[in-house]
Image (spheres, rainbow, N blue to C red):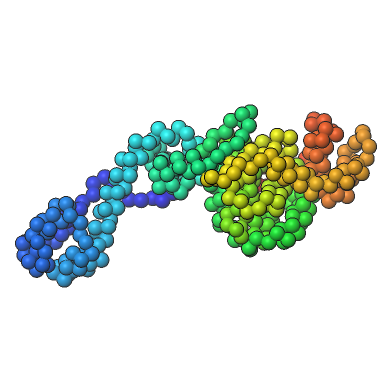
Amino acid sequence: MRNEYTPEEVSPPGETLSETLDAIGMTQSELAQRAGRPLKTINEIVQGKAAITAETALQLERVLGAPASFWNNREAQYREALARRARKAELATHVGRLAEIPYAAMVKAGWLPREKDPVARLDNVLSFFGAASVPALDKLVSAAQFRRSNAYPANRFAILAWLRRGRVDAERIDCAPYNEAAFRQILQKVRGLSVTLPKGFDAHLVQLCAGAGVAVAFTQELPNTHVSGAARWLTPQKAIIQITLRYKTDDQFWFTFFHEAAHILLHGKRQGVFIDKNDPMSDTGDDVIVDGATEIHDERTENEANDWASNFLIPDSELKKLPRPPLSKRSIVTFATRLGISPGILIGRLQHDRMLPFTHMNDLKKKLVWAEERGEPKA
């Protein structure tokens, strides 16, 4: 957040003018005569009732010698200070709204600075969201339409904060113009990353996808968001896949990633946001937040994304070749190796399809955690 000097007492530039006149022994009347301005105008400037215009600044430059830029800057600083004082007073009437903002969680995530003063906290919130005022922030919230399961009540501001952070991070990623064919080829390489999950795989994933015009943003989930991932378009030439480590296992992570990739590939450059807030491998589908007046995406698009991700990771034709039960860890690992995927992904698919109990073989799933210092994922 920006640190700005906002003094409690702000003197008008007229005080500086008065001090200058005293220093050189010139009266207001003489200044008015030399500048060709009414005495009343000079007096109002000295009292802070009238502003120093660009024309007046030039006249003061000729008469007093101080450059016009000095007087213009003095006036501008004074007016800005007055505006900041008025803004602070206006924000003070809205500090109760902080109860709706997950400020502490955003501080913990490193998105906002620690701050005790409630007015300064609210100002930080507005800067984070890129909103000039509380009413402007409310318009951003009201412009977003939600469709979500009642089983997972979510904090609307927490979801918007998560999306905002992902957008800011994605904007910093240098991407080539979007190329669908290149993205499909890159996804084949990404699929292979699941096998070894090398150290720094997240950076490698970001680099690969950026080459096809897709920015991948890893964003920690805030409390009460229940978010796994999201997909949307930043520009017609740059898409975003935003992802968390909500379930902390490789099967959930990769399914979520390829589910969001499917939205990019299959569902066009819409202005809405596909956001996954439930178990992406469940039968409930995704919940969706949509910006502005665009349509709410139906379950068809979610089912399409689910089917595409499932078949991309493990084609149905290949799944039919799985050895007959009872399955052993050895047979699972052998089969996953032949498919070129992590055994954890296969376990997750078999559990989802009720071919394996959810309590079985979970030790074959790789764990994912956030690095505390960097806020980035690591294996």
Specify whether residue 218 is in view. no
In the rendered picture of this protein, how many numbered marks are placed on residues?
Answer: 0
Answer with the quarter of the image where residue 31 lies.
bottom left
The percent coordinates of residue 227 (x first, y second) are 62, 39
Q: Can residue 119 be seen in this view?
A: yes
For the residue pair 242 and 239, the one nearer the viewer reads as 239
Question: Could you say which is closer to the camera, residue 207 or residue 322?
Answer: 322
At horizontal 27% and vertical 61% (from top left) the residue drawn is 73
- In the image: residue 21, left or right of residue 99: left
What is the x, y in percent for residue 277? 64, 38
**Residue 139 in the image, given as x and y percentages of width and height:** 45, 42
Residues 180 and 107: in front is: 180
Determine the residue positioned at 79% across, 35% down: 352
Q: In screen coordinates, is 100 left or right of 92? A: right
| For residue 232, above or below residue 118 | below
Q: Residue furthest top?
A: 151
Q: Residue at x 73, y 41 (%)?
A: 303
Residue 257 in picture, x, y percent from top left = 70, 47
In the image: residue 367, left or right of residue 361: left
Left or right: 94, with 272 as reference point: left
Q: Name the residue rendered at 26%, 45% in the picture.
A: 8
Q: Give the quadrant of residue 280.
A: top right
The image shows residue 140, relative to residue 59, as above or below, that is: above
